[in-house]
Amino acid sequence: AQSSVTVFGVLDVAYRHLDNDTAGTRDVLGSSGLSTGRLGFRGVEDLGGGLKAGFWLESEVKPDEGSQPNARFWHSRATVSLISDSLGEVRLGRDFAPTYSALADFDAFGTTGIGDTTRIYKVWGSVDSKVRNDNQVTYFLPANLGGVYGQLSVAAGEGTAGKKYYGGRLGYAAGPLNVNVGYGQTEVTNSDVKLTVIGGSYDLGVAKLMAAYQQGKYQGNKDKHYTVGATVPVGAFVLRAAYSKSKSNDATDRDADRIALGAVYNLSKRTALYGTYAVIDNDDAAKFTVSNDYSTIDAGDKSQGLEIGIRHSF
Amino acid sequence: AQSSVTVFGVLDVAYRHLDNDTAGTRDVLGSSGLSTGRLGFRGVEDLGGGLKAGFWLESEVKPDEGSQPNARFWHSRATVSLISDSLGEVRLGRDFAPTYSALADFDAFGTTGIGDTTRIYKVWGSVDSKVRNDNQVTYFLPANLGGVYGQLSVAAGEGTAGKKYYGGRLGYAAGPLNVNVGYGQTEVTNSDVKLTVIGGSYDLGVAKLMAAYQQGKYQGNKDKHYTVGATVPVGAFVLRAAYSKSKSNDATDRDADRIALGAVYNLSKRTALYGTYAVIDNDDAAKFTVSNDYSTIDAGDKSQGLEIGIRHSF
Amino acid sequence: AQSSVTVFGVLDVAYRHLDNDTAGTRDVLGSSGLSTGRLGFRGVEDLGGGLKAGFWLESEVKPDEGSQPNARFWHSRATVSLISDSLGEVRLGRDFAPTYSALADFDAFGTTGIGDTTRIYKVWGSVDSKVRNDNQVTYFLPANLGGVYGQLSVAAGEGTAGKKYYGGRLGYAAGPLNVNVGYGQTEVTNSDVKLTVIGGSYDLGVAKLMAAYQQGKYQGNKDKHYTVGATVPVGAFVLRAAYSKSKSNDATDRDADRIALGAVYNLSKRTALYGTYAVIDNDDAAKFTVSNDYSTIDAGDKSQGLEIGIRHSF
């Protein structure tokens, strides 16, 4: 059975200096600065006639404390797929929500580390589907549509509020251009959370520019988040920069903006050193921080951090 | 070390429509409809002279929610073995109780999914050894006995009620015939639980017929469970059918009978699509359901379900 | 990615007869008598120019109950390394404290099973760094120093008492000789715990002699632990013997001494049978036991045990 399984993963450890203004500073050894730490098992079986079966099991790993950060071991992904070259893929299990991918693919910091644009991204109530969905059935378009890609997802609620979801994503990637739109709706008690996302990137060669916009609606309130960024390859280096802004009109008025700057030095395809600086400027009641490693902060204070780390893939 | 380890597993996801009569219906994405989801590591080392050492680590996986369903990660199996070609195998660790295997091998639905015959199988008290035992030492007969097979198992209680067990199983498999008997005894406070099992199958070619009977005794009460079933191969399809009945004479009188019908379509040796319908007819106070995914039911009500899924092995 | 990952592990199961004097006896099936049970994933990537990247993930396994004994799955080790042939290794993540290795390398029973010398090793307060450290940054000397080896480690406290640590170890190994010294300091509320370790071994051929001494200081108290032992290879057998003594001058006066005797029979490089007898003589208030599998004991009582097991590596 061995030949049918690929064992893969990422271990990423970073030193972080975190400064949350009035709340003071903290120095930590943390995880997942450049890529999310993980251990996974995956494989594809050729069934003949252009049909394949595939599976994917992935567990998050925090090497700084030797832990899996989630109670559910395969929290990152656990799916079985039937894949037709001409008709597309049906994927069943726990996986990313399409609305999350539609945003994350266009964050210059890959929604990871202190540069993650979603650090200032507001979520209402107990919306389990912000990042991933349990019980998800997804249909992906096949790869032969001349650059058009997309997916439709439905997640069963199974009697738990904040879990019933449907959404989708449609995009076009060809040459230097990649654009996509996404929409998703999660059933929450008394109201639905509705997310709309637009994102895109253009690769100029000397730099890849990217931008994404997300709008959320819930109980009459509206929340907006956008990010613009760029990655610039310079030899073995990749420089990265991004600006993000969140704005909501609900009672708690949790607005913030954020700048992130960084550099990645690729020792090989698998191994890289990196450094990132990020600062979040919280408005009024907002309490966003650049890292979960130190989340004590006074409302409206500034959170900034510097991380220097190593990422090794296998 | 790599060559000595085989990574193996099963991911199995099914859509289930569950109907528990007065309690209503529920639609879920569930796991393990055809085979129990798992990830495992195993290997065998040839020590020379007809002697081998072996190990087996197996963890259950529920891809619908990305979880390991048990707190103990290697809940399914964790064993080390010394195996002699001529003298048999000694296996140490956590593993199936022989009484469970003696029944499960003759269930047309492999004690998995909504067709699992043990859905209406009563257990008394805190009998940990219903399915598997911790701290188990098992001796297996060697494979060269002309079709005779068997095992003897002892599990240490280590001061915890419901865990001290001894039992065994003796069978004969040759050509189309396979029969076995099993007996096991678990020490419970004030009384022992005693299980006796008889099971067999006969392969007619056009159909494989199977039947199993289990009798349990506890504090003067007697509990009977039997199942009869058949699997019918038709090209790439396998049709399956089973009828089960449980009868007990204790105060709560939890009797039920059950019908399961299904079809499996093998896309390959490793990948299959399947569908199963099952209905449980609860008597009086009985509250059995076809799936743990929806276990709310009124006493004496009917539980039925339909599942359609995909099973992928690696 | 498969070729870059080695899956490795140990499964070790032992029958144990434990006798804690007044508290009585217990018979159990236990784990890790000869080597600690584990499952791991590791790999090394050659970056060219004498530089390598490496990773190591290791989880403890108790096959007797099918469990991972620690809530954090990668509790045993989770590290990423940059390794230079000429300059040494920088290793980041959760790993052994150098003070522990400085002692453990010179225990005739490898700090495992009922013969483990640290069974009578006292620890003050909530010193998390007794064995391993979270958030540890370690520098290892390169292998080309003519037998000199060593490491320096710093572990970030991250605001939790008993976790901030720095320490190191320096040794010399050449021909039959191996000696080392270690020092480590853990920040605890009101006082630091300071450990000093000296250990060494000499291989006479017919026998390998080993000894280690550890001194701990905390809040004006001093704690001493030493062990002397030998391993004697006789064909496929290895005989083992050790004597250990702990002495402290704090109020609870938890002193004890201990004898362990054992034999290992190697069926192959990977598989061994073993037997060990150990007895702990507790002074006054001391309540040390030979195994966590039965830790009920009256103060000052004797704890003894016999274990017979099998260890299989993969």
Image (cartoon, coloured by chain):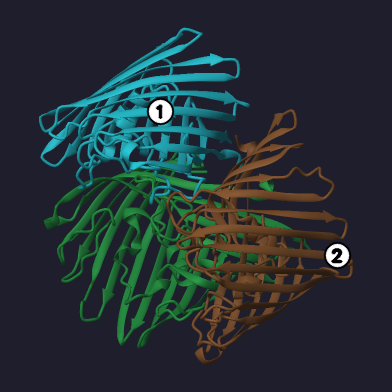
Chain colours: A green, B brown, C cyan
Would residue B205 be found to the left or right of residue B45 on screen? right
Q: Mark 1 belongs to which amino acid?
A: Ala
Asked which quadrant contains residue A256, the reply is: bottom left
Residue C278: mark in rendering:
1
In the image, residue C265 sits, relative to residue C5, either above or below, namely above
Residue placed most toward the observer, C84 or A78:
A78
Please, what secondary structure does the residue beneath circle 2 have?
Answer: strand
- Marks 1 and 2 close (CB-CB < 8 Å): no
Marks 1 and 2, how far apart at CA: 56 Å
Asked which quadrant contains residue C101, the reply is: top left
Task: Give residue C210's position: percent from left, percent from top.
Answer: 39, 15
Q: Mark 2 belongs to which amino acid?
A: Asp
Q: Chain of mark 2?
A: B
Q: Is residue A256 visible?
A: yes
In the image, residue C303 sits, relative to residue B202, either above or below, namely above
Asked which quadrant contains residue B1, the reply is: top right
* Residue picked out by circle 2: B203
Question: Can you tell which of label 1 and label 2 is closer to the viewer?
Answer: 1
